Image: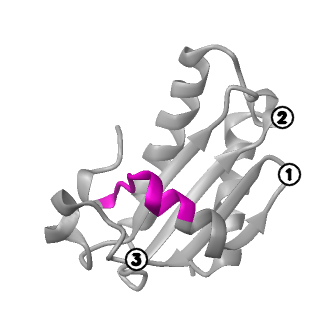
Amino acid sequence: MVLPKYMRLRGYKCFNYIHKFARRYNSHSLLLKVVKANTKLASTRDKPYEKKSFRWAISISTKVSKKAVERNRLRRLLHCHLRKRINKTNSLNGYWALLSLRPNSLNKNQEILLEECDNLLHNAGILK
């Protein structure tokens, strides 16, 4: 299941802002970028939700896999995992995050990949 609309991050200005100003947390197969939200950059249709939630995006390059089916499988796996983890915490309202997968992440076992994701979330202070 995908993230709800109020938790999704979209728009190239938001992504450029994240790439430029975010704090980075690395693991072997994942990269997490977290930044304080800039609500001026959010699209106008997102205004009702702008301060309501912690917004996410997941980026999976074609370097990970050329097949869209495999990339979408990884995306769905991470969306479901993040949705379970993030719904428990409300202390992050007003922040944006981008989770990127590295090319070696396709060869990893799902449990190991989700454990790395949890470690990154813990390092970033998202999970306590």
Which residue sits at x=63%, y=63%?
19
Instruction: Give percent across and percent down for residue 61.
Output: 66, 33
- Look at the magenta stretch and give its main secondary structure: helix
Q: Earlier in the sequence, mark 2 or mark 3?
A: 3
Spatial separation of the CA atoms under disc 2 and disc 3: 30 Å
Residue 28's disc number: 1
Q: Which residue is mark 3?
A: 89
Q: Which amino acid type is shown beneath numbered disc 1?
A: His
Nearest to the observer: residue 20 or residue 79: 20
Which residue sits at x=80%, y=34%?
103
Nearest to the observer: residue 81 or residue 65: 65
> Image quadrant for the N terminus?
top left
Q: Give yes or no for contact between labels 1 and 2 (Cβ–Cβ under 8 Å).
A: yes
Q: In which quarter of the view is residue 86 placed? A: bottom left
Callout 3 crowding tier (Cα within 10 Å): few <14, some 14–19, many ≥20: few
Q: Earlier in the sequence, mark 1 or mark 3?
A: 1
Query: Disc 2 or disc 3, which is closer to the eye?
Result: 2
Magenta residues (range): 7-16
Q: In which quarter of the view is residue 25 placed? A: bottom right
Instruction: Give percent across and percent down for residue 43.
Output: 27, 60
101 in relation to 36, above or below: above
Q: Which residue is mark 2?
A: 104
Q: Which amino acid type is shown beneath numbered disc 2?
A: Asn
Query: Disc 1 or disc 3, which is closer to the eye?
Result: 1
Describe residue 109's horizontal placement relative to residue 11 as left or right: right
Q: Which amino acid type is shown beneath numbered disc 3?
A: Thr
Q: In which quarter of the view is residue 8 placed? A: bottom left
Dot 2 lies on which element? Answer: helix
